[in-house]
Amino acid sequence: MAVSSPMPAHNRKPKSSSSGGGSSSSSLPYTNASADSALTSTLTPQLYLQRMTDLQQMDLQSAIDQMRILLTLYPQRVYKMAYYRKQTKNHWARDDPAFCFLQIVMIAAVSIAYGFAFRVGSFLDIIAVVTKSVLVNWLGFGVIIASVGRLIANNHLMMAERSSSHVKQEVEWLYAFDVHCNAFVPLFVLLYGVQLFLLPVVLGPSLLSLGVSNTLFAMAFGWYFYITHLGYRALPFLSNTEVFLFPIAAVLGLYVFNYVGYPFGLGFNASRIMAYIYFES
């Protein structure tokens, strides 16, 4: 699905961005090194976590509005806010933890619902399911994706500096984690929300069950990596961010393989595998 970016075109090739006066990176205010150092000392993961314990510091309505945008045909509009933050606060990442807070609450609530759906016997078992969902599926997966994405961007996708007066920028780790949180929204809706109501269908042994289950997973992860790509594309100092779309090819490959391999006993149902991992007891 081809959608237009709300930001000026900047991610085509390093060569084209250096020529012409209409580049978005030239309009972005570059700050001096001391300002960047001050930013690093004020916006840290520790401070971010501290703010998460104070509901009065969170704008929950804004976070809900952003989640709604991410579920529309124009999810890139969310990253326009990051551009404004860079211009006004000199950092790309959210300093309001409301978005993460809401995701944790929603994941915990739906995980409890799954516990009841699978008739989990004890309270401790339900807590274990919630903990696994939050710490592994959301946080652990997010930390890995954010760290790898930031590493690729900073080491391989940076545009060449055009002038010694421009301070070199880099992808903030908190911004990379923001990108994961944004991309997790449609994944959550499909694999936590929609799948919950389709459990009698997706857990069956038939080809129909396999098809519905794997279609949900393919859509969820395809959407995840597409929004991830939009997040890095929004940064005007990166080029060739199309590399973040490459995992979608792997998702499609697995999807097709399951159908082709099903007659030979090689197809697998993703929902049944996840149910076994979480509720095998």
Image (cartoon, rainbow, N blue to C red):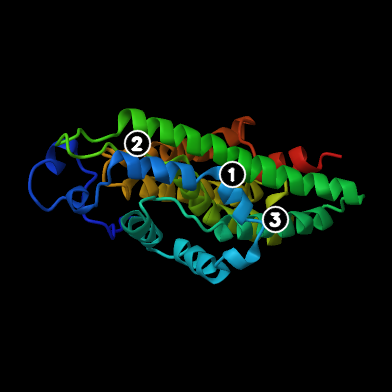
Task: Name above or below for residue 102 compared with residue 220.
Answer: below
Instruction: Report helix, strand or loop for mark 3.
Output: helix
| Residue sitting farthest toward the bottom | 61
Return the mark for residue 243.
Answer: 2
Amino acid type, label 2: Val
| Residue sitting farthest toward the left | 20
Q: As rendered, which of 40 and 70 lies closer to the eye? A: 40
Eye-nearest disc, 2 or 1: 1
Residue on which the image places disc 1: 46
Does residue 20 appear to the left or right of 141 in the view shown?
Answer: left
Residue on which the image places disc 3: 201
Residue 142's quadrant in the figure? top right
Does residue 51 appear to the left or right of 174 in the view shown?
Answer: right
Does residue 127 appear to the left or right of 34 in the view shown?
Answer: right
Q: Residue at x 32, y 29 (%)?
A: 156
Task: Name above or below for residue 21 compared with residue 273.
Answer: below
Q: Residue at x 49, y 34 (%)?
A: 147
State the image coordinates of residue 272 (x, y, percent, origin top left). 71, 43
Tag 3 or tag 2, which sits nearer the N-term? 3
Q: Residue at x 46, y 40 (%)?
A: 173
Amino acid type, label 1: Gln
> How packed is label 2: few (under 14 Cα within 10 Å), some, or many (20 or more)?
few
Residue 19's quadrant in the figure? top left
Q: Quadrant of the N terminus?
A: bottom left
Instruction: Report helix, strand or loop for mark 1.
Output: helix
* Residue 258 visible in rendering: no
> How packed is label 1: few (under 14 Cα within 10 Å), some, or many (20 or more)?
few
State the image coordinates of residue 281 (x, y, percent, origin top left). 87, 39
Amino acid type, label 3: Val
